């Protein structure tokens, strides 16, 4: 099969050259777009955390800013992979979009952050943000603007909210906050979105609760960058193929 492909490309190297040029131009365009987005997000992040002195203050400031400045817009039907942070900042979204922007801005400060999915009866019902502060993952709910404290100024983790639901319900306004949004089944990957429920069940049997800490969605916090990296790999593959063809022609 490999020899057949090389024969086709050797017979029509111009097609390979054109493909490489078109793909490279698109990759450059996407790279420029990513650079512009990064610049906007970097400036925004610095504005939000301007008066913060530590990681906890930064994450709280970001959570509050996202809650106050991003419009709730459940009418957007685009797949999440196309909902980039800059798109969400402009058009809004629901819990997953709020959590994504919050996590991206937190990561811009150097604080590890990821999405946390709350499940009920095997389905995702809510999405929040986790940030790694003071040697543990702490929970933030940017859609509702909630910050959960275990006591005093100590932020609560998902496990602490699960084991101590009074922390959750003493923080939220139960007249507007759905009571089903508990942390009894919290996972770091939306396995349904990837149609990988069987894989999750397999991992659950093999590694137990550790399966709930596998975070695949973190790769899609910045979908443009993930796609850009994929395009670079294809560009490199086409370039190497072209060089091999030229080398074979010179030998012939």
Image (cartoon, rainbow, N blue to C red):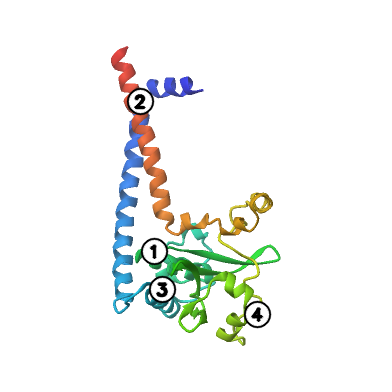
Q: Which residue is mark 2?
A: 13
| Pointer 4 or 3: first along the chain | 3
Name the residue: 30% across, 75% down: 47
> Where does the image place residue 229, in percent across and percent down from the top left?
39, 46
Which is nearer the N-term, disc 4 or disc 1?
1
Q: Earlier in the sequence, mark 2 or mark 4?
A: 2
**Which residue is most to the right?**
121
Task: Judge whether residue 182 can be spotted in this image.
Answer: no
Q: Secondary structure at mark 3?
A: helix
Asked if the residue at tag 4 contacts the one at tag 2, i.e. Cβ–Cβ closer than 8 Å, the answer is no
The residue at which mark 4 appears reads as 179
Is the C-beta separation of discs 4 and 3 under 8 Å?
A: no
Mark toward the start of the polypeptide (1 vs 3): 3
Q: Is residue 18 above or below residue 200?
A: above
- Towards the viewer: 236 or 191: 191
Q: Quadrant of residue 38?
A: bottom left
Q: Nearer the viewer, mark 4 or mark 3?
A: 3
Q: Viewer-proximal residue, 231 or 175?
A: 175
Q: Which mark is residue 59?
A: 3
What is the CA distance from the residue labelled 2 to the residue labelled 1? 43 Å
Q: Residue 107 got which mark? A: 1
């Amino acid at each position: 099969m490999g020899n057949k492909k090389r024969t086709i490309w050797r017979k029509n190297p111009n097609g390979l050259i054109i493909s490489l040029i078109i793909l490279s131009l698109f990759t450059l365009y996407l790279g420029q777009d990513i650079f512009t987005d990064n610049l906007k997000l970097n400036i925004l992040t610095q504005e939000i955390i301007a008066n913060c002195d530590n990681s906890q203050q930064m994450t709280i400031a970001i959570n509050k800013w996202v809650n106050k400045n991003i419009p709730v817009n459940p009418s957007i039907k685009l797949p999440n992979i196309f909902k980039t942070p800059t798109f969400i900042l402009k058009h809004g979204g629901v819990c997953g979009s709020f959590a994504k922007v919050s996590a991206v801005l937190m990561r811009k400060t150097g604080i590890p952050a990821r999405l946390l999915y709350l499940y009920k009866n095997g389905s995702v019902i809510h999405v929040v943000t986790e940030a790694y502060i003071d040697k543990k993952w702490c929970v933030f709910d940017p859609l509702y603007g909630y910050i959960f404290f275990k006591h005093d100024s100590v932020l609560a983790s998902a496990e602490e909210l699960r084991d101590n639901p009074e922390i959750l319900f003493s923080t939220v306004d139960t007249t507007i906050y759905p009571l089903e949004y508990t942390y009894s089944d919290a996972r770091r990957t939306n396995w349904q979105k990837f149609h990988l429920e069987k894989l999750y069940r397999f991992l659950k049997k093999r590694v137990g609760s550790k399966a709930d800490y596998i975070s695949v969605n973190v790769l899609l916090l910045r979908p443009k960058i993930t796609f850009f990296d994929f395009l670079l790999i294809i560009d490199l593959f086409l370039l190497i193929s072209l060089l091999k063809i030229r080398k074979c022609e010179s030998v012939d």
